[in-house]
Image: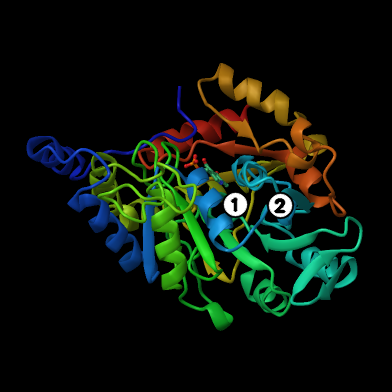
Amino acid sequence: MIPLSVPSIRGNEWVYIKDCLDTGWVSSAGAYVERFEQDICRVTGADYAVACVNGSAALQVALQVVGVQADDEVMVPTLTFIAPVNTIRYLNANPIFMDADAFYNIDVEKTIQFIQNETVFREGFSYNKTSGKRISAIIPVHIYGNAVDLESLVPICQERNIKIVEDATESLGTYYTQGNLNGQYTGTIGDVGCYSFNGNKIITTGGGGMIVTSNEAVAQKARYLTTQAKDDPVRYIHHEVGYNFRLTNIQAAMGVAQLEKLAEYIEIKTRNYKRYQQEIEHIRGLHIAETPNYACSNYWFYCLQIDKDIYGKDREQLMAFLAAKGVQARPVWYLNHRQKPYRHCQSYQIETAWALWEKTLNLPCSVDLTPNDVAYVVSVLKHA
Ligand SMILES: Cc1ncc(COP(=O)(O)O)c(C=O)c1O
């Protein structure tokens, strides 16, 4: 079976992890944690980084440190893995679901329209006209490594005091190439950004995450909350409810090794994306989705779009056919505004997200995918 997305472990992982084992530094205190945080800052241009147990924990703490409170509302795309949506609920706040654009990202135009027409600004905060609740934050998710059009979104959020928590869990290494954000990396533009190092991400620590920010006080608060809010670590005095959310040294050691390979991994993923694109162009009814022209994507995942009337098979039929031929593919996530825990929540003009959901399959995209693997997948697609 050619898997959808599996890790590539080909660098200094063994060396650095052995170092942790040899020295006994295995827990969340240890030099690799700090080194991994510094390396992430160096690679992304972030000022501060706080390593966490996973991307979900990073997002939860990020929302908390930007000021999301119980009963608030947070805007989020309906087309995303459910994790960012769940983190809103962990804080007893509620999501408002937004549509997707052509790049699977939150539809920024509609989101701006929503803020302008459906909210009022009062005493320094934005309130939802329908629910009367405060909208304290938005989570733009850089889906599949595609950069959200943040240049358009940032000004209105600043004007309306809506904090931006970037979910850059899928987009480590993606950066903008145009406009005001030219040269800046996803994750470093909003008030706080979050990365994930889950097993299927572009680099992995098995499980892991990172909070980044340019605000020192926010970084300090995140560090404090993720280490059980220790006000006096010797006498165990705690003034707040904290979490045991820090990354271990072993995982950070793996992260340091993986991060050394990020540029190479992105190069391979970009090459494989182009291979798929060139070949699939010749198959009637199939198309590889483009990435935004205002950014350089990390090409984490590839999206095959199917016109079932021309191609003759729909998404489910093609997924089953590929599986029978030893190729793992999968549809995009079911839309969150229709998931059982969130059906009662507000959603705003969801249209494109349905169209993308219906016609998309993700194709194998691991770093270790060979040119022969790509050729095989394409030949299966040709003969389906
Ligand atoms: C968009 C998105 N947000 C958040 C997460 C959560 O990250 P983690 O699995 O590290 O908790 C993931 C991936 O798993 C994701 O794809």
The percent position of residue 168, horizontal first and vertical second, equals: 52, 56
User: Mark 1: is the Cβ under 8 angstroms from ligand 1?
Assistant: yes
Left or right of 73 in this view: 301? left
Residue that numbered label 2 is attached to? 77
Q: How is the image coloured?
A: rainbow
308 relative position to 89: left or right: right
Q: Secondary structure at mark 1?
A: helix
Relative to residue 160, is residue 147 drawn left or right?
A: left
Give 359 or 247, whichever is nearer the viewer: 247
Residue 124 locus on image (x, y percent):
74, 77
Q: Is residue 74 above or below residue 118?
A: above
For the point 41% across and 36% down, which residue is it? Answer: 199
Amino acid type at image mark 1: Ile
Q: CA distance from mark 1 to mark 2?
A: 10 Å
Q: Nearest to the eye among marks 1 and 2: give it.
A: 2
How far across and down, in percent of the image, does residue 301 sit? Answer: 53, 45
* Amino acid type, residue under disc 2 in the picture: Pro
* Residue on which disc 1 sits: 143
Q: Is residue 236 above or below residue 177?
A: above
Pointers 1 and 2 in contact (C-beta within 8 Å): yes
Q: Is residue 245 above or below residue 341?
A: below
Res 372 seen here: yes
Q: Residue at x 74, y 45 (%)?
A: 356
